[in-house]
Amino acid sequence: MAKHAMWSEKYRPRSLSEMRNQAEIVGRLKVFVEAKSMTHCMFAGPPGTGKTTAALSLAHDLFGERYVDAFMELNASDARGIDVIRTTVKEFARIATISEVPFKILVLDEADNMTSDAQQALRRTMERYTETCRFILCCNYSGRIIEPIQSRCALFRFTPLKSQDVADYLNHIAKTEGVEVEASGVVALVDIAEGDLRKAINTLQAATSLGKSVSEESVYKVVGRAKPKDVRELLDLAVKGEFMKARQMLRSLLVEYGLSGSDIIKQMHSEIFKMEIPEKTKIVLADAIGEIDFRLTEGGDEEVQFSALLARLGIMAGQGK
């Protein structure tokens, strides 16, 4: 692997035994390797949870040195039309392999972006060449794949990775690369990733460009987000009825940090559920934030809409006294 490679590729597992989390799925795929037999598969789930990695690792474990000849990966976001299915996919699927495993594997990444015509052509190809080729379809939303294809595939549903698994892997990478990561930095990376390991690794690599040590501040600076405690403080001020202080802090986040209104509103929505306030207050907050989010998407002025939000929270605080 090249010295300056992206860490998400450099540290991508090459075998099923190296994969983190998704233990049940890994166990089922290992049975395929032992039996040297498998069905068509559909890997569905959020980004960065190991779908493509699982497909690559399965192929590595199955074919060993013959991996290059017996495996092909296509990104259906680029190759999404019917012509690709009729040419590239069909040509690969129809030719038998010379490895000891009697079939080849073709991975279609982001298969839910394929056109309807392409999916119909793929269904026929899967039907005709099932003896010589097995298909693995990776997608975020299995419902966007036509029913005839779904019925031909065994479904593997990937879930977001657990926070501890993400933190452990990040610490492993940091140690290997000789990067110092503060505990608060790891917490911030895990919080931003939301179970997406690829996003966590890419953010870690980007944060290392800001200094020798990766801190909470450097992580949030890289992704262009405010620190959660700043957003929580803003909400606390508003709920307490301190309108002018809250407005001043909001202006600081919008102007000095260069954040967009949509970014702040998403963080506000996330933080209200972590605040130690009555549930009724959380309901009112969620309702108010939802309305302002809609107004912003419709083109409302950020500062005016946020001021209105803070004013509403201040009025609510006054009524509660």
Image (cartoon, grey):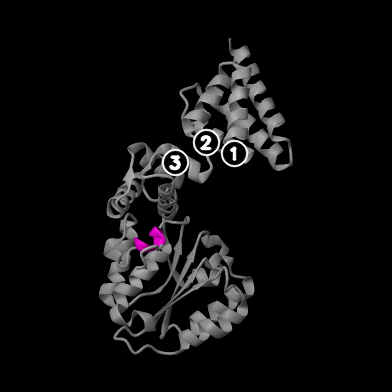
Residue that lies at the very extreme toward the front in this rendered image: 211
Magenta stretch: give its range. 6-12
Alpha carbon separation for disc pair 3 and 1: 15 Å
Is residue 84 found left or right of 50 in the rendered image?
Answer: right
Q: Which residue lies under the disc numbered 1?
A: 259
Residue 317 picture location, percent across and down: 60, 16
Q: Amino acid at mark 2?
A: Ala
Q: Which residue lies under the disc numbered 3?
A: 218
Alpha carbon separation for disc pair 2 and 1: 8 Å
Q: Is residue 205 magenta?
A: no
Label for residue 226? 2
At x 25%, y 73%, the residue is 34
Q: Amino acid at mark 3?
A: Ser
Secondary element under disc 1, as helix, strand or loop, is loop
Of circles 3 and 1, which is in front? 3
Binning the other alpha carbons within 10 Å of mark 3 as few (below 14), some (14 to 19) or many (20 upward) gives many
Q: Nearer the viewer, residue 290 or 12?
A: 12
